[in-house]
Amino acid sequence: MNYILATLATFTVIVVINAVYQKLTNGVCKSKKKLGGKVALVTGGTSGIGLEIAKDFARRGAKVIVACPFKEEGENAKTIIMKETGHEVVFKLLDLASLKSIRDFAADIMKTEDRLDILMNNAGVGLPGDFYTQDKINFVMQVNYFGHFLLTLLLLPLLKKSASKSEPSRIVNTSSGLHLLGSTNIEKLNRTGYWYKLQLYSNSKLCLVLFAHELSKRLKGSNVVVNGFEPGIVGTRIFNSLNVVTGTIITFLAKILFKTARDGAQTAIHIAVDDAAGKVSGQHFKDCELTRAKKSAYDDVIAKKLWEESTRLVKLSNDEIEKYINGFQ
Ligand SMILES: NC(=O)c1ccc[n+]([C@@H]2O[C@H](COP(=O)([O-])OP(=O)(O)OC[C@H]3O[C@@H](n4cnc5c(N)ncnc54)[C@H](OP(=O)(O)O)[C@@H]3O)[C@@H](O)[C@H]2O)c1
Ligand SMILES: *[C@@H]1O[C@H](CO)[C@@H](O)[C@H](O)[C@H]1NC(C)=O
Ligand SMILES: *[C@@H]1O[C@H](CO)[C@@H](O)[C@H](O)[C@H]1NC(C)=O
C-alpha cells in the first residue's frame, strides 16, 4: 500500500514539475501587431494548432481563410472562430492529397483575393497509412510536403504582389522535431512500403526544412520571406491516425505534460507577425526563437535535388516555375 502511494506521489510530482517546465519554456508570441487589411491563409486551419493560429489572426483583424478537405469540418471551424473571436472567416475546400484540388484552390484564391500576406502551411497528417494518392505520390508525403510545395509556388505571385520592404509577405512551414529522423535519399521519397512508418512522417518534415533553404535563396530580393518551425509535442487529434484509443490517450497526456494547441501555435504566430522575425528568411524556429534544424537540412546540393524532384512529381513545367518565381518581381 505504502509502496503504491509512494509511486503515485512520485509520479504526480514528476508530472507537475514537467508540466511547469513545459509551460515556462514554451515561447509565447508577444507581438501586439494588428493585421487589419491583410489576408492570411491557414491550410488546415480547422483543427488543432491551425485552428488556434486562425483565431489569433482573426483577433488581430486579418481576413482569414481556412482550408481543409471536409466541408463539415470547415463550417464547424467557422462557427467556433466566430463564437470565440467575433470575427467572420472564410472557408474553402482544399485537399492537399490531390494536385487538381490544389490547382483549383489556388486558381480560386488568385481570382477572388487581391492580396495574400501570410501563407501558413500548417495542414498535416500523422501516419494514417502508407499508400499512393491518385497522383501516384505517397499520401503522407503529398499532404505534408509535396502538396504545400505546389500550393506555395502557385500562390507566390500574389504573395509577391502584396509584399513591400517594410511589410514582407511571410510563408510559414510547420515542420517537426521528428525531421531529425528524416532521410535525404531524394530518389526514394515517393515510394511506399516503409517498414518503419515514422520514417515517412519524418521524411516529409525534413523536406519542408530543406525547402526553406532552397526557396529562400530563390526569393532573394523579393520581400517574401519563408521560415519554418517545430511546434513541440502538442495534444491534438493528429495522434488519432494511429488508432482512436491510443490517440486519445496520447493527446490527453501531451496536453497535460507538454503543449495545448494554443501553446503549439505560438511560434507560428510569432514568425507570421513579429517584426524581427519578418527580417529573416530560410530559418528554423522553436519556442519563438531562432534555432537550427539538422545539418543536412542546409545542404545546398540536397535542397536543389529535392526542388527538382518535387517539381517533377507535382508536374510543374519549367515555364511555370519561371513564371511563379521570377515573373512578378
Ligand atoms: N501535434 C503535434 O504534436 C505536432 C508536432 C509536430 C508537428 N505538428 C504539425 O502541426 C501541424 C498541425 O497539426 P495538428 O497537430 O494541429 O493536427 P490536427 O488537429 O489533426 O490538424 C491537422 C489539420 O490539417 C488538415 N488536413 C489534413 N489532411 C488534409 C488534406 N489532405 N488537405 C488539407 N488539409 C488537411 C486537417 O483538416 P480536417 O480538420 O478536415 O481533418 C486539420 O485541419 C501538422 O503539420 C503537424 O504535422 C504537430
Ligand atoms: C512514384 O513511384 C511509383 C512507384 O515507384 C511509380 O509507380 C509512380 O509513377 C511514381 N510517381 C510519379 C509521379 O512519378
Ligand atoms: C516551406 O515549404 C515550401 C513548400 O513545401 C518550400 O518551398 C519552402 O522552402 C519551405 N520553407 C521552410 C522554411 O521550410
Image: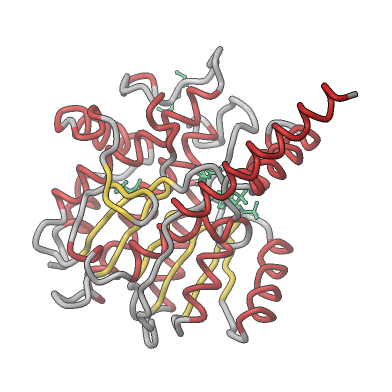
Image mark count: 0
Q: Residue at x 51, y 78 (%)?
A: 58
Residue 78, quarter of the rendered image: bottom right
For the N terminus, give its image quadrant: top right
Residue sitting farthest toward the top: 195
Q: Residue at x 14, y 33 (%)?
A: 300
Front-lying residue, 25 or 53: 25
Q: Residue at x 62, y 62 (%)?
A: 46
Give the vertical position of 136 relative to 231 (above or below).
above
Q: Relative to 112, is 130 on the left or the right?
A: right
Residue sitting farthest toward the front: 2
Front-lying residue, 136 or 27: 27
Q: Relative to 191, is 309 on the left or the right?
A: left
Residue sitting farthest toward the left: 221
Give the vertical position of 13 relative to 91 (above or below).
above
Residue 313, quarter of the rendered image: top left
Quadrant of the picture in which ligand 2 is shown: top left
Front-lying residue, 113 or 198: 198
Find residue 150 and report its horizontal and vertical position in percent: 37, 49
Find residue 88 and report its horizontal and vertical position in percent: 59, 83
Find residue 24 and report its horizontal and vertical position in percent: 48, 54
Q: Residue at x 20, y 43 (%)?
A: 214
Q: Relative to 222, is 250 on the left or the right?
A: right
* Colour mapping used in the image: secondary structure
Find residue 45 and report its horizontal and vertical position in percent: 56, 62
For the C terminus, give its image quadrant: bottom left
